Structures are given as structure tokens and as C-alpha cells.
Image (cartoon, rainbow, N blue to C red):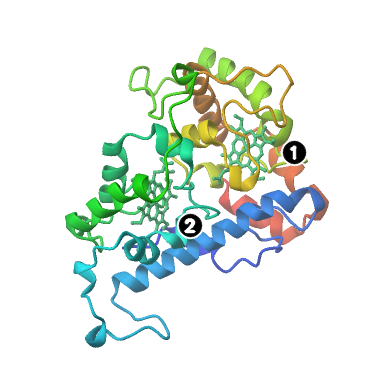
């Protein structure tokens, strides 16, 4: 599996370096964002693990293939398959990895089984989620993909249906209106952003005291719209980011986000990748900008 270029860059960056892929230095306000950059390094590590596994290399201290009790393509234990193939990116226990947590009860509640299966089998093209099935140059058989897909919801329990179930936003992106990035939609999305996100991530996604910038083209380029939608719905409890309904960092009378509002919000966020606010980069790094950090960011600007 070819290693996607951006993470090849991210890997060697020490966590507090001004050259971190987030373009954010050791300033106090960067603390949270650094967690993201640490996560990115871990994602790169996951990738290395994967490449090693794919190339048949043994990890230090691991038994050699001859005395391994079960050949790799016949492993059918969820735990083993998960630990070998997924934990590097999604976290040892399905959480606190750089990739979206898989143990999240709300995520497990709303994600359709077919999506889980297809994502593991075919990956998410354009993101770091690789295809795992052999036919797509992955390392797993169809049967092993099935073990993982079926296993997620058995291993980690989905949230039970809630009393206000009909208000829980749908997991899937809308198929209708797909590709709509009209000015009107972006403007509606911006309003949702101000209400639900700006309190922590700052005006226009520039980054705030409680959370890092979102208007970072290098960051957004690695996340699909589907992943953005999912993160808005489930939040990242492991990183103190609220879900679609929680009021942390929001007005006390905050009303849960609706499916339609999240549609607009995702269009707005995607537009930040193409048209980041003019001051975003300066604001983010201003406290600890070195010429090298500035150059690094400039390099990444399309
Ligand atoms: C190289 C890192 C990496 C590895 C290894 C990896 N994933 Fe992923 N995975 C990701 C990323 C990144 C995403 C989000 C992609 C996006 O932007 O949509 C993702 C998304 C997913 C999703 C959809 C989550 C959602 O929020 O919609 C599932 C399910 C998933 N992965 C399962 C797995 C399983 C099971 C394995 C092991 C067989 C695995 N992944 C291995 C990086 C990885
Ligand atoms: C209470 C504060 C808070 C609010 C409100 C909030 N977030 Fe976050 N968010 C965080 C924190 C903390 C993180 C973790 C790392 C960081 O600072 O980027 C995070 C991370 C993220 C990430 C990266 C997640 C990942 O898996 O790498 C995205 C994308 C994001 N937030 C989008 C949003 C959007 C969109 C909204 C509005 C719907 C929002 N956030 C509202 C605090 C918040």
C-alpha cells in the first residue's frame, strides 16, 4: 500500500516543533492543537505498522512465520485482527487514535452495517483509510473483513435508542443536493458554525483558546465530508469535543443540531479548505513563528 504523502511529512515532526504539520508552534494556545499533531504522528505510525504488516516483516520480538500458530490469512479473532490492522490509527481500544474513534456508542448506533463493511473492505479513497481486502491490494480476506465489520458492534456496544431518537442526525451525507456549494448554503453553514463551533474553534475556523484551527487546508484535505459530518454528530469525547447536542462551549440555550444544519455546516467547512480566511494562518502561528515555520506553511499552500 503506498503511503500517502502528507503523512510521510507528518511522521518525523517532533510534537512541539514549529514545523509541526499544523503549522503551530509551542505557544500556549497551541496546546490542544498539538494533540492533533501528536495524533497525526500516531497516524503515521499506524501507517508504518500497516506497511510492515503488508510487506510480511516481523516486528521486533514477534514470532517468526514458521512458528506462528495460525497463518495470517486464517486469523479469525476480532481482537487479533483489530490489534494488527486497525489499532495504529483508530486507537488500541477504538479510541484516542488520530482516526475517528470506532468505539463511540453514538457512532455505532447510527452507522449502517453496510457502510462499516464497505469502508473496511474498500477504504475511503482520498483519505488515509486504506482498503483492506486482498482484491484491492489489502492484507485481509473477505472473511476477515466480515469478522471485523460484524465485530465492531459486538465488541463495543452501540448506544441504545434514545427517547428523542427522531432528532438524532442521520449518519450518512445527503445524496440529494450533493456537491451543492452555493453561496446561500455556505452562508447558512457559517451561521451554524458560529452557533456550534466558534466558541472553541474561533471565528471562521481560525482556532481559539479551547481548540485548534479547522480552517487548515492541509488538515481538511485529509478528512472526507463524511468524516466531518460524523465528527460533528458524535463529537470526540476522548478529546473533549462535544457531540451535536451537548452545550459545552456553546450558549446555554443551544438547540441540538439538525441533520439539515449539519449538511450546511459541512459545506461551509469544506469551503474553508478552498477559501481559508485570510488571517487564519497568521493568527494560528503568530506567537511562535519562525521563518522556517512560515516557509513550511507557505509550501503547503496550494
Ligand atoms: C492508516 C490509518 C488507518 C488504518 C490502519 C485504519 N483506518 Fe479506518 N479510518 C482512517 C481514517 C483517517 C478514517 C476517516 C476517513 C475519512 O476522512 O472519511 C477512517 C475511517 C474508518 C471508518 C469509518 C468511520 C466513520 O467515522 O465514519 C471505519 C468503520 C474504519 N475506519 C474502520 C477501520 C478498521 C476496522 C480498520 C482495521 C482493519 C481500520 N479502519 C484501519 C484511518 C485508518
Ligand atoms: C467545547 C469546545 C468545542 C466545540 C464547541 C467544538 N469543538 Fe471541535 N474540537 C474540540 C477539541 C478540544 C478538539 C480536539 C483537538 C483540537 O483542538 O483540535 C476538537 C477537534 C475537532 C476536529 C478534529 C477531530 C479529529 O478527529 O481530528 C474537528 C474536525 C472539529 N473539532 C470540528 C468541530 C466543529 C465543526 C464544531 C461545531 C459543530 C466543533 N468542532 C465544536 C473542541 C470543541
**Can the viewer see residue 156?**
yes
Name the foreground residue: 293 vs 36: 36
- Rendered view: 28 above or below 258: below
Name the foreground residue: 98 vs 124: 98
Q: List x then y, in percent, for residue 62.
A: 37, 83
The tag on residue 247 is none
- Rendered view: 174 above or below 240: above
Q: Residue at x 53, y 12 (%)?
A: 184
Q: Which residue is mark 1?
A: 208
Name the foreground residue: 134 vs 301: 134
Q: Is residue 142 left or right of residue 128?
A: left
Q: Residue at x 32, y 42 (%)?
A: 116
Q: Residue at x 34, y 17 (%)?
A: 176
- Rendered view: 135 above or below 124: below
* Location of residue 87 (image quadrant): bottom left
**Can the viewer see residue 21?**
no
Q: Residues within 10 Å of mark 1 (few under 14, many from 20)?
A: many
Find numbered disc 1 in the image and state the secondary structure of the residue it sits on: loop
Q: Residue at x 51, y 18 (%)?
A: 258
Task: Kindly check if marks 2 and 1 are in contact, taking CB atoms under 8 A apart as contact.
Answer: no
Nearest-to-viewer mark from 2 and 1: 2
CA–CA distance in space, label 2 to label 1: 29 Å
Q: Which residue is mark 2?
A: 93
Q: Is residue 273 left or right of residue 206?
A: left
Quick one: which residue is furthest to the top in this view? Answer: 184
The number of callouts visible is 2
First reached walking from the N terminus: tag 2 or tag 1: 2
Q: Residues within 10 Å of mark 2 (few under 14, many from 20)?
A: some
Amino acid at each position: 500500500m503506498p503511503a500517502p504523502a502528507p503523512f510521510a511529512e507528518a511522521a518525523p515532526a517532533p510534537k512541539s516543533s514549529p514545523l509541526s504539520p499544523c503549522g503551530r508552534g509551542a505557544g500556549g494556545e497551541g496546546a490542544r492543537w498539538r494533540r492533533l499533531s501528536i495524533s497525526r504522528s500516531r497516524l503515521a505510525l499506524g501507517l508504518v505498522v500497516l506497511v510492515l504488516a503488508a510487506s510480511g516483516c516481523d516486528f521486533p520480538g514477534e514470532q517468526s512465520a514458521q512458528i506462528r500458530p495460525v497463518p495470517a490469512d486464517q486469523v479469525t479473532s476480532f481482537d487479533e485482527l483489530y490489534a494488527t490492522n486497525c489499532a495504529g490509527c483508530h486507537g488500541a481500544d477504538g479510541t484516542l487514535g488520530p482516526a475517528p474513534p470506532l468505539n463511540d456508542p453514538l457512532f455505532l448506533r447510527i452507522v449502517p452495517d453496510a457502510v462499516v463493511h464497505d469502508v473496511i473492505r474498500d477504504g475511503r479513497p482520498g483519505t488515509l483509510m486504506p482498503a483492506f481486502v486482498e482484491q484491492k491490494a489489502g492484507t485481509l480476506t473477505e472473511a476477515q473483513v466480515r469478522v471485523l465489520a460484524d465485530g465492531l458492534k459486538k465488541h463495543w456496544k452501540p448506544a441504545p435508542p434514545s427517547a428523542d431518537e427522531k432528532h438524532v442526525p442521520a449518519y450518512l451525507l445527503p445524496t440529494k443536493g450533493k456537491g451543492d456549494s452555493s453561496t446561500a448554503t455556505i452562508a447558512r453553514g457559517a451561521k451554524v458554525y458560529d452557533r456550534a463551533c466558534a466558541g472553541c474553534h474561533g471565528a471562521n475556523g481560525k482556532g481559539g483558546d479551547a481548540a485548534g484551527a479547522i480552517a487548515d487546508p492541509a488538515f481538511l484535505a485529509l478528512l472526507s465530508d463524511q468524516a466531518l459530518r460524523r465528527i460533528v454528530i458524535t463529537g470526540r469525547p476522548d478529546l473533549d469535543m462535544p457531540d451535536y447536542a451537548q452545550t459545552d462551549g456553546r450558549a446555554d440555550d443551544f438547540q441540538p443540531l439538525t441533520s439539515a444544519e449539519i449538511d450546511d455546516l459541512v459545506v461551509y467547512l469544506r469551503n474553508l479548505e478552498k477559501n481559508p480566511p485570510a488571517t487564519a494562518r497568521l493568527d494560528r502561528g503568530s506567537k511562535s513563528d519562525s521563518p522556517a515555520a512560515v516557509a513550511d506553511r507557505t509550501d503547503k499552500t496550494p
